[in-house]
Amino acid sequence: MTQAARRRMRAFLRAAFLGTLTALVVTSCSDGHLDVRSVPAAGWSSYGGNSANSNFTWAQPPADLAPSWTRDAGGTVTSPIVMNGGGDVVVSARTARGCNFTVLDYRAGRKNFCKRLADGFWGNAAVVDQFSQPYIGEPGRFLALTGGGSIRWRHDGPGTPTSAKFVAPGQVLVTTTQGGVSIFNSQTGDLMMPELKLWPTTAEAPAAGLADCVTGGPACAISAPPAVDWGHKRIVLNYFPQGAKTSQVKALGYNGELSQEWTADLPLGVVGPPVVSNDGKTVYAFARDNKLYALDAATGKTRWSHDVGDAGFATMSVSPDGVIIPAGKLGAPLTILKDEGDAVTEVARRDDLQTAGLSTQTTTGTAWAVVRTGADQHLELIEVDTKTGATKRTLPMPESKGFATGIAVSPNGQIAVATYAGTVYYFDAKS
């Protein structure tokens, strides 16, 4: 075993031990019994990297990061990849046959397991707990799997679940394209509180409205993953009311029961998933007028708006200190913004870069982004300084085309990138 491998193994075992120990300590009951409740895996456990959808990581990618392996997913990858606490990659792909949901081992990209889920699930990223157990939805049902891919429990219901989130230890939030909002016990699958049905009527076919989910149209009640603020027990949705002309930002509370807190109507409607700030005081969302809006998380009132030119991928990276990197349209320049409270300022703009997907910020004050370059428009992974926009390093993505559907970072700083064309690229320390 190499020195690097030993280092990664020690780090993984330490993280696993500490995660398990924390769960045991936190969930100890007064009668001496232990209730080991699931929590998000360390690292990149869900869509957006965390419950808030902020695409930010506390991990530090190593200085000698380099390409490690690539893997063909067998079809297009239309949702962001996620990673478990050990750095394994969880991929949802749209394949013609065979497996379309796969977990790849961090060491060489070999399959830990794979399954075929129902057609229409492929827009969803899994959420993974500290035991490397994935939770994923498909049309008509939500599944809780073991680390080996067996079904632990399932819940059937109308619509197709969006990417799920943990809302508390042992509690998994599931929202559906037909307007259902449920919180389940992650161990048993039992409802933790009564389901909230935002649409009064639902279609019989579970895949009904999926085409509108891609565009955020009226036939899809909830077209994007929710954002969750654990501290204030608040869920924020991109929600299209039944019979309405435009979608809106909707906030729900979940303190013992699901309750509606506020709604915010943005010009021409909302596009993409909302994001909650690290302190839980601000909600960020794109509107169809191509502006980014910052809303007061307690009331839904607008604090500021900023014209981004084109909402593009309608997602963003937000750091705890308010640095925002919108994912513009394909080929858009890299733009770095700073939330100043009642206004927003532009920190840097790189017109020489052609972005090709969402950026991910790290605790070191840098961001990782995929850009197009050269006459053949191949893709590269770059790291930039979020204070100046200056490029710090560039890593190759051989034979890559199109755009990236997400950048995930493990607790040890390994980076995984998936392209829409269907290739997973993995970067690890050289030594």
Image: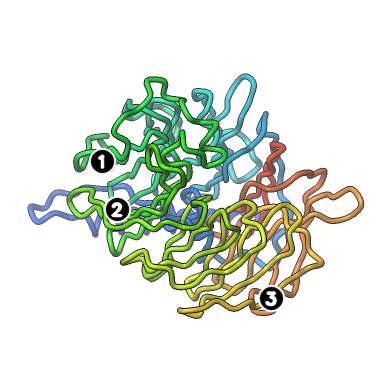
Colour style of the rendered protein structure: rainbow
- Mark pair 3, 2: CA separation: 35 Å
CB contact under 8 Å: marks 2 and 1 = yes
- From the viewer's perspective, tell me whether residue 193 is left or right of residue 123: left
- 247 vs 326: above or below: above
Q: Which residue is mark 1?
A: 196
Q: Along the polypeptide, which appears first: circle 2 or circle 1?
A: 1
Instruction: Kindly identify which numbered label has been placed on residue 252.
Output: 2
CB contact under 8 Å: marks 1 and 3 = no
Q: Residues within 10 Å of mark 2 (few under 14, many from 20)?
A: many
Secondary structure of the residue carrying numbered label 1: strand
Q: Residues within 10 Å of mark 1 (few under 14, many from 20)?
A: some
Q: Quadrant of the C terminus?
A: bottom right
The residue at the point 81 percent across, 47 percent down is: 398
- From the viewer's perspective, tell me whether residue 10 is left or right of residue 297: right
Name the residue type under label 3. Ala
CB contact under 8 Å: marks 3 and 2 = no
Q: Position of residue 348 (x, y in %)?
A: 69, 76
- Mark pair 1, 3: CA separation: 43 Å
Name the residue type under label 2. Leu
Instruction: Kindly identify which numbered label has been placed on residue 348.
Output: 3
Q: Position of residue 232 (x, y in %)?
A: 28, 63
Q: Along the polypeptide, which appears first: circle 3 or circle 2?
A: 2
Name the residue type under label 1. Leu
- From the viewer's perspective, tell me whether residue 183 is left or right of residue 12: left
- 257 vs 242: above or below: below
